[in-house]
């Protein structure tokens, strides 16, 4: 998978991939004080391309910056337009966008407040984040020994650059142990989320997921899954859950922009249900993919259409 593209949008203009560089004293590079988004664009069966839930992603980017007290020098409408410009400039009728807000290199130190604020929007064509095999047969996950950050240590409702050290350390640890993904518990021991995905359990035909007010990122895909479940008449319970509820779940799946809807077939050496994707997970996944890639007319408000011309 190549992360190369022709052009990257930087601070209001398109620059060549090779020229999208920053100084080594870029503040965010040192301390992680910045914010980002991950957004997918899809091409549907009828050939129409769209950016999935673009307005919600840009809204969350502004919220993340607001949490940090960073003023983005563009409007949400500017950045929505910039996402389309970026995809067009690269001739991408599907792909992944990674808007990034970061502090410039004028001064260093933790107390720096006057640095310029920059926005870059790279894009590339990213296939299935955990692999196409994962979407079909499910992944193997482990409960991480690293906790998801305490809600008062990191600002969990922000997609904030430096906070991802917590995710990367858990992900690398899980992969070293031979698993595909890590499931993280909060500092009270309750199930939180994965390193870059929210988690859903299916038990007795119901969906259960940790509540928005816990240590999770408010996933946009999580909300899409909840909406799809309601459309399908499946009950969703948002509540805390314990680690062993995972082990005795009928089905489990993860969801996120990158990971889409990925079933979990095993956790810590224990089969989940029959050890393959279950009926409700498969129904949610196929409905999701039909909306984003197929021909379902449902939820047109999630799709921001664009064309390459
Ligand atoms: C920690 C974390 N949780 C959950 C998600 C899923 O969020 P979304 O569905 O908005 O991509 C992400 C991905 O952005 C994430 O980084």
Image: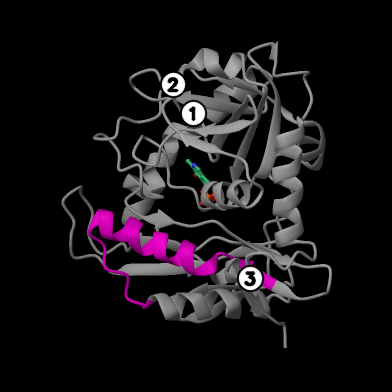
How far is mark 2 from mark 3, CA to CA? Answer: 39 Å
| Residue matched to label 2 | 146
Q: So how many labels did they put on this image?
A: 3
| Mark found first going from the N terminus, 2 or 3 | 2
| Circle 2: element type | loop
Where residue 294 sits, quadrant-wise, is bottom right
Indicate which disc residue 169 carries: 1
Q: How is the image coloured?
A: one colour
Identified at 44% across, 80% down, the residue is: 78
Height in image: 14 above or below 103? below
Residue 19 percent location from the top left of the image: 55, 71
Real-space Cα separation, disc 2 to disc 1, in angstroms: 8 Å
- In this rendering, the label closer to the viewer, 3 or 1: 3
Please indicate, yes or no, whether residue 26 appears anywhere in the rendered image.
no
In the rendered view, tell whether residue 265 sits above or below residue 162: above
Determine the secondary structure under disc 1: helix
Mark 3 and mark 1: Cα distance apart in space: 37 Å
User: Which residue appears at 68% of the width and 64% of the height?
Assistant: 298
What is the magenta range?
50-75
Quarter of the image containing the C terminus?
A: bottom right
Q: Residues within 10 Å of mark 3 (few under 14, many from 20)?
A: few
Q: Which one is nearer the viewer's eye here, 217 or 110?
A: 217
Q: Which residue is mark 3?
A: 300
Q: Is residue 222 left or right of residue 284?
A: left
Query: Measured from the top left, where is residue 39 in percent x and y?
Result: 57, 60
């Amino acid at each position: 998978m190549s992360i190369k593209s022709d052009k990257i949008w930087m601070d209001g203009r398109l620059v060549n991939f090779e020229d999208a560089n920053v100084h080594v004293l870029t503040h965010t590079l040192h301390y992680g004080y910045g914010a980002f988004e991950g957004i997918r664009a899809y091409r549907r069966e009828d050939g129409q391309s769209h950016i999935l839930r673009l307005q919600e992603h840009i809204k969350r980017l502004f919220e993340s910056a607001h949490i940090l007290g960073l003023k983005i020098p563009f409007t949400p409408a500017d950045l929505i337009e910039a996402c389309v410009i970026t995809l067009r400039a690269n001739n991408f009728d599907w792909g992944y966008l990674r808007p990034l807000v970061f502090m410039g290199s004028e001064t260093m130190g933790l107390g720096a407040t006057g640095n310029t604020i920059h926005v870059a929007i790279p894009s590339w064509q990213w296939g299935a984040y955990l692999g196409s095999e994962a979407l079909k047969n499910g992944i193997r996950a482990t409960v991480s020994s690293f906790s998801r950050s305490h809600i008062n240590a990191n600002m969990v409702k922000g997609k904030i650059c430096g906070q991802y050290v917590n995710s990367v350390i858990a992900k690398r640890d899980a992969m070293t142990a031979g698993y595909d993904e890590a499931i993280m518990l909060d500092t009270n021991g309750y199930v939180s989320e994965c390193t870059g995905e929210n988690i859903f359990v299916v038990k007795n035909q119901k969906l259960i997921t940790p509540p928005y007010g816990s240590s999770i990122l408010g996933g946009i895909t999580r909300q899409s899954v909840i909406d799809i479940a309601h459309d399908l008449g499946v009950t969703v319970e948002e509540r805390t859950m314990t680690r062993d509820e995972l082990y005795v779940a009928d089905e489990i799946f993860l969801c996120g922009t990158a990971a889409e809807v990925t079933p979990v077939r095993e956790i810590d050496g224990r089969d989940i249900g029959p050890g393959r994707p279950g009926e409700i997970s498969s129904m949610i996944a196929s409905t999701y993919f039909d909306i984003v890639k197929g021909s379902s007319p449902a939820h047109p408000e999630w799709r921001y259409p664009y064309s390459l011309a």
